[in-house]
Image (tube, rainbow, N blue to C red):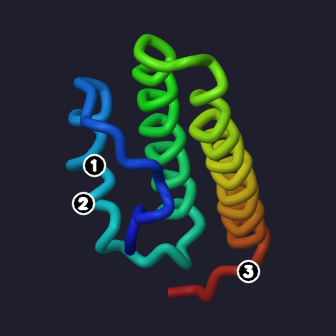
Amino acid sequence: MSFAHLPQPPASPGEAALLPLLAALATEDRGKPLVEAQLAVLEAALLLARAAEAETRQPPADCLEPLTAALGSVRAAVHATSHALIRTRDGLRSPHPSS
């Protein structure tokens, strides 16, 4: 998995804390809704940390890209979490084989 689509400013303390988590989850199957939700939330947090850092150093217009990308990541997290919830509820409703 690549995060090349994310803007690459210098690492902030908040970003440095998130990168190991992103790297660990990057080896997981992103086809699993819970993994996708976790990655999307971490990606949003990383983008928000970058937007906050940019806000202190650059004109407000430079915050638009990371903020827009963070919103997209949050939407992806909501969608993936909803999918995981529906799968779990469907699993509870289906009959379980008797042992």
Q: Residues within 10 Å of mark 3 (few under 14, many from 20)?
A: few
Q: How many marks?
A: 3
**Vertically, is 87 above or below 50?**
below
Residue at 29% across / 73% down in the picture?
27
Using residue 18 as the reference point, say whether residue 60 is left or right of it. right
Image spot of residue 35 (x, y percent): 47, 63
Image spot of residue 51 (x, y percent): 51, 27
Q: Amino acid at mark 3?
A: Pro
Q: Could you tell me if the residues under marks 1 and 2 are in contact, i.e. CB atoms within 8 Å?
A: yes
Q: Quadrant of residue 9?
A: top left
Q: Compare marks 2 and 3 and give the one earlier in the sequence.
A: 2
Q: CA distance from mark 2 to mark 3?
A: 35 Å
The residue wearing badge 2 is 24
Front in this rendered view, residue 84 or 61:
61
Q: CA distance from mark 1 to mark 3?
A: 36 Å
Q: CA distance from mark 1 to mark 2?
A: 5 Å
Q: Residues within 10 Å of mark 2 (few under 14, many from 20)?
A: few
Front in this rendered view, residue 42 or 80:
42
Q: Residues within 10 Å of mark 1 (few under 14, many from 20)?
A: some
Front in this rendered view, residue 95 or 54:
54
Q: Quadrant of residue 10?
A: top left
Q: Compare marks 1 and 3 and give the one earlier in the sequence.
A: 1
Q: Quadrant of residue 53?
A: top left
Which residue extends farthest top?
56
Image spot of residue 89 (x, y percent): 74, 61
The quarter of the rendered structure image containing the N terminus is: bottom left
Q: Amino acid at mark 2?
A: Ala
The residue wearing badge 1 is 21
Q: Could you tell me if the residues under marks 1 and 3 are in contact, i.e. CB atoms within 8 Å?
A: no
Which residue extends farthest front?
59
Tag on residue 95? 3
Assign a secondary structure to mark 3: loop
